[in-house]
Amino acid sequence: MQNKDISHIFREIAKILELKGENLFRIRAYERAAQTIEDLPESIVKVYEEKRLTSLPGIGNDLAKKVEELVTTGLLNYYHELKKQIPSGVIDMLGISGLGPKTVKLLYDNLGIDSIEKLEKACRQGSLLSLEGIKEKTQSNILRGVELYKHARERIYLHLGLDIAEKIIKQLKSTGLIEKIEIAGSLRRKKENAKDIDILAVSKKPSEVMDAFTASPLAAQVLVKGQTKSSVLANERNIQVDLRIVGEKNFGSALMYFTGSKDFNIKMRQLAIKKGYHLNEYGLFSDKDSFKKRTLASKSEKEIFSFLGMAYIPPELREARGEIEASLEDNLPELVEFGDIRGDFHIHSDYSDGSISLEEIVLCAKDKGYEYVGICDHSQSLKVARGLSVSLLHKKIEAVRMIDNRQKNIKVFCGSEVDILAQGKLDYPDSVLKEIDFVIAAIHSGFKQSKQELTQRIVRACQNPYVRAIAHPTGGLRGLREPYEIDFDEVFKAARDYNTALEINCHPERMDLSDTRAMAAQRFGVKLILGTDAHNAEQFDLMAFGVNAARRAWLERQDVINCLSLDELSKWLGK
Ligand SMILES: [Zn+2]
Ligand SMILES: [Zn+2]
């Protein structure tokens, strides 16, 4: 259990208590405790182990006991009992951005709305307007929140999808019935989210594989069971998983077909026709007529591409965005690979809201085989994330220098994720910025400004001689906050002209810039930088998802700052 997990549960409790109309004092107690734990500069587990819980502000005996239960069992009985007293749909409604417990209670008490579906319907019918205090604008904001909520749950993020798919594949392999097995569909194309999971396999005993798949402990519900194709809902996230058994001899054509994308498949079929062939999931054939046709290629994708006179197209590129033409001209990009990554810059330490120390960060970076690492904590205005005052920043710079001096195989940079304030001014004066090795600027407030104002803020930040990159340039948070609108041409122009990189934030909830935006930036002449935004040790692994997005954006090594050698990087840092 991490601090943020416990503070999240306490906040949920506060919301449920508010829904139930409990006394304000208890509600505030949970909110206060949640804040204390969230702001805590050390691990709550450590505080518990050292028996210091009750020394924390707002944590009395009762709350200390609850923390103890969470730390030792991972669960909290009180929270589960509390949740049972409220219809689960009402609890779901609390997860909608911009909808507080007060409004949820109002909707439930007066209109009997106890599910997201009913809420959506009521918004569309305009029924909320009959309630006191709810205006047209509030109603449309709630509806927007519902749409974001639903969208975030209809699809699952790539990392979760891959995780579920790999577990299922591992389990199927353990039956000994499988000769070959691959993930297909959008997951194989490493699209940032997926609406289902496609798996293809080769087996001599298809019906036994179907039995094993549908009886799997990983499946919550069987949707269809057939001889060679079955679908289940995975017990994680309720996502649909389709498993198909195909013949060994047409595994390649099936894999290509079920990997897609749809548009890519259409273009490939058209290309085959133009060359006088016929392409489908069973192979590439000499003719459409089943009596006359001869199989030209089907066993592997490589074989099919090569028969059509094409270079192999990596799955990440198969979106009908010009890759077929480039492949025919043997002009595909040499995509950046994970092994090309030499460092990460966007990492938060326990100086601000991260949970790892400077030393631990260096160890994690070495573990990844990096040649350099930048430690970027928040700046002074971002109080919620414990941004660093100038004096604390000075302390940190000194600490980083000391650690760096002790290192032989890795360079440690002191960075900062500096807030871009309302008018585009930066959160530290230039005299301070120039002492920092690596300044990443980012917007964390004022999201409601106009497109023009937001664009100007980023443009001004790009122009600052000390700013090397802009973090999460469009500020979206999946399911919670839509990206704000900016004028990309203007931002790209400033980024290119002032040699400021734009970040592909690797965090699954951000993935900002998206693949298509990053592609547009590269074509404009802008450099991209991958940032994990890691707040703990595990999140160093998110780099793989940034690399996926970079590959989908057609990026090559020279487009990505993280691929620079230390010498090249030092030169670039000098702007
Ligand atoms: Zn940030
Ligand atoms: Zn950050």
Image (cartoon, rainbow, N blue to C red):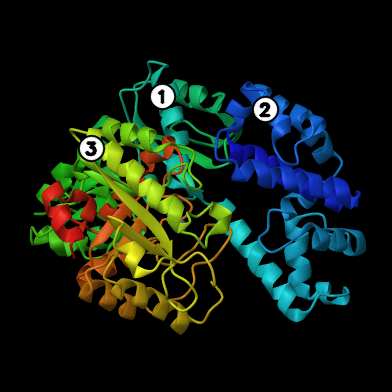
Which quadrant is the N terminus positioned in?
top right
- Mark 1 to mark 3 CA distance (whole Å): 45 Å
Looking at the rendering, which quadrant does residue 100 occupy? Answer: bottom right
Left of 460 or right of it: where is 78?
right
529 above or below 474? Answer: above
The disc labelled 3 sits on which kind of residue? Asn
- Mark 1 to mark 2 CA distance (whole Å): 43 Å
Q: Which residue is mark 2?
A: 52
Which is more toward the observer, 268 or 140? 140
Q: Which residue is mark 3?
A: 405
Q: Nearer the viewer, mark 1 or mark 2?
A: 2
Q: Which residue is mark 1?
A: 170
Q: What SS does tag 1 mark?
A: helix
- Measured as percent of width and height from the top left, residue 166 is found at 41, 31
Q: How many marks?
A: 3
Left of 71 or right of it: where is 408?
left
